Image (cartoon, helix red, strand yellow):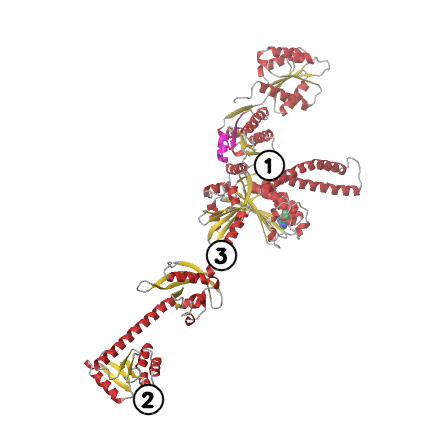
Amino acid sequence: MNNHNIRVLVIEDNPGDFRLIQEMLSEAKDKLFQVELAENLSGALECLKQGRIDVVMSDLGLPDSQGLATFEQLRARHPDLPIVVLTSTYDDEATAVKAVSRGAQDYLVKGQVDGKLISRVLLYALERMRVKEELRKGRDRAQKYLDVAGVIMVAIEANQKIALMNKKGCEVLGYKQEELVGRNWFDTVIPKGIRDEVKDVFDQLIAGGIEPVEYFENSVLTKSGQELLIAWHNTALKDEKGNIIGTLSSGEDITERKQAEGALRESEQKSRMLVSSITDGVIMLDKDLHIALMNPAALSIVDQPESGSYPDTAQLQRALEMDFEEWRRKFAHDQEGLQRKAVGINGRFYEITISPIKDAQERFAGMVISLRDVSEEKKLEELKSEFVSIVSHELRTPLTCIKSALDLILSKRTGDISQDQDKFLSMASRNVNRLTRIINDFLDLSKMEAGKMQIRFQKLDLGAIIEAAVSTFALGAKEKSVSLSAEIPPNLPTITGDPDRLNQVLSNLLSNALKYTPEGGKIAIKASNINCLETPIPEILSLPYRDYVRIEVTDTGPGIPQDDLKRVFDKFFQVEKSLTRMMPGTGLGLPICRQLVEAHEGRIWAESRPGTGSKFVFVLPLLNGVEIFNSYLENLIQRAKSAVSCLSLDLVRINHFQTIKVGLGVERVREIFERVVEIVSKSSYKATDHVLPDEESARVFLILENTPKEGALAVCERLKQNLLNFDFSLDDASIELEFSLGVATYPDDANSSKELIQMTERTELISALVVKQRTVLVIDDEENFAHSLGRKLKRRNYQAVEAFDGVEGLEKALQMDPDLIILDVKMPRMDGYEVIKRLRETEETKDIPILALSGSLHTDTDRLMALGANEFVTKPFSDGLLLDAVRKLIRKREVKHGYRIVGG
Ligand code: ADP
């Protein structure tokens, strides 16, 4: 529209009036108005349809429409068009006023108007319409904003009626907009139960009695009768004078959230109750390895007060003997959880199970550690072990008797037996053998389980051990037409281990393989070196070592079902439903193998695809003697630690061992070492003591479990005496042996195996022995007798010197300073009594022990002893008796004079 050209439609059936109006408008300045005429309503409507008209000026009395109806029809069709009603003085002016109240912009009375008035009225009408239009648009825009909002928006007037409700609100409440606007808010949507109360609050608010509550939650009813919980935010609407005229509220449907929150809270509460009432300890770590949760049981296990905070992570790791970081690494490498290990904490034993927590992307999100108290089981297990070992011992003795009786009868030394008797007795004998085997296995296993099996570590060539085991089974394999082969690489490193025990492992595996492999089958042993960093093996991931030798025994027997692969290492387990069940066995062989391999810090497992045979694999870490000894001792220290007990270590070291080795040769030295080991073993009385020989460095350790320092010192003293009293004499060599003895106790002296060993080494209890060939002087006038006795003595490692009468004897005694004199009493020239008397009178010979021999019953023994003989033996005598007496006499003198003791 343009102010210079306002188009006016005049609806007037009186041509005179129209002309008048036309003239008046044309008088207007700048010819503002462009006037069109319609003589009746239908003509007007026709003209309006074309849409060119800006404002209408209409008489109400027309040929085709009368009164207010004229206006109503116009407005209904063109609500946006400003309409000015024309009326005459004789018409009812009241009708015109009514039209204005219904939306007409103004009215004019014909005959009372001039050009100025008309044009002003028309211009005002136009302007008012424009403003109204602006307002409407503004309101529409506001409604649109409200509709876009994701929350309910409702304006309530002071009279409780809904002034405005946005789309979301309608959606939530299930009404159409027109169904709500104008209705009483409270009667429509507030549930009956709280309606009056809410109304009351609203009325007080409108009356200015209270401030609007900024936030509250209450229920509303939807059209379908569903009750929803809404969170409301409210503001008061005020007029320009500050009077409250209503409220504007935004509301959010929180029904589901509240329900979910409730459910979550409930489930959280349930889990918390569950976790805290579990008697097992449960610890949860988050992805940064911080403690996220510890239930009361876990807190009490690590001695942490329940109300206080969690222990710090380092402290927890120490208590559980775990390295969390290491586990995180393992889980990152996709290792499965559920690793079990038994750990002693504050005197009780716990089985620890560790499982990873993964997030939705399968990334590490933490771990759960559970601690199950297995102390009772362990105690029972120990009792059982002990019981088994006692029973087995008791069974072995009568069995030996039965066996020798059977063998005796079968050998027919007690008389002839019939064929039938032979048959049945042989059967009995075979079964006795079998029973003995079972009992031996039993005993072995119970010893190992109680930690009493002695492992004697030494450097060894595994290849040779494999070859020896293979050759033991070669004949059996040949008889069964089974091929048996071994593949040993030439560069297989030497390892530290117990050759007998490893032989036992191989023999068990080979005997199983041979037992289960049918005729024409194959058994192969293969050894190799592996480096864990290059080829990680899941079975040994929990071990800290890097280099291993791997030995596998493969057969073409029936194989083992997948589910049984782990269980074959359980005691008494035998695979059901297979051929193997028919074979005689104890179900103890593999558990023994496992114990032995694990005592070497190794691992053993079985692989199999049923139908194609079995493969038993074991790996042994490449540790040197010191390392393996350390880890062995460390395990025992840990055991003592968790049992809040102590542990002592006694050490015997043969000093200058290398020099002795050069002098005597390896074989001899090994003999000496063996004897020392034997002495150490004999010096310990307790079944829980462990003898650990370390031949490489010429040390023998005696580990005394549950023994305090005083006990260990007492054992050490006994050890020292036993060493001193032992005859180390060698055939032809003279050598000085020097020993260091040492004692150290956990926890008094040290906390770790390394320190403990260092402590024993530092203790200076030095004792030394001289081992040399002893000289025996034989004085007898019967030359043949003297020669024969001399030969016997030489065979027993003595140097024998012979003299054939008393005078010669006295001379040689002075000359040679023998360690012992064997003297015949009855001799010509000078008899034995005289010789003794003279020997005792002479300073150089007065201490030499004298063994008197007499062939006559009339010998005056009292006189002999009174003169100074130390012992007398009557002819004829057994060699054993005489030699025994010889040894004793020499020893007695040496000890008495401290002769053999050089130091300490
Ligand atoms: P057993 O004295 O019964 O052989 P083991 O402990 O040596 O006891 O073996 C346990 C069980 O494992 C055996 O009974 C057998 O079922 C199974 N088994 C062991 N070695 C083999 C093998 N080489 N092939 C098939 N099954 C085997």
Q: Does the CB distance between marks 2 and 1 fall below 8 Å?
A: no
Q: Earlier in the sequence, mark 3 or mark 1?
A: 3
Q: In the figure, is residue 175 to the left or right of 883?
A: left
**For residue 53, side relative to residue 820 (left or right):** left
The first of marks 3 and 2 along the sequence is 2
Residue linked to disc 1? 452
Bounds of the magenta segment: 736-761
Q: Nearer the viewer, residue 19 or 42?
A: 19
Amino acid under label 1? Lys
Question: What amino acid does circle 2 point to?
Answer: Pro
**Around disc 1, counting alpha carbons within 10 Å, would you say few (fewer than 14), some (14 to 19), or many (20 or more)?**
some
Q: Is 868 covered by the magenta stretch?
A: no
First in sequence: mark 2 vs mark 1: 2
**Label 2's element?**
loop
Q: Is mark 2 within 8 Å of ligand 1?
A: no
Q: Is residue 743 magenta?
A: yes
Residue 63 is tagged as: 2
Question: Distance between the Cα atoms at labels 3 and 1?
Answer: 59 Å
Q: Which residue is mark 3?
A: 262
Q: Is residue 787 above or below residue 332?
A: above
Tell me if residue 864 comes above or below residue 344 in the rendering. above
Q: Is residue 226 visible?
A: yes
| Residue 719 in the image, given as x and y percentages of width and height | 57, 27
Residue closer to the observer: 284 or 150? 150
Say what amino acid the circle numbered 3 marks: Gly
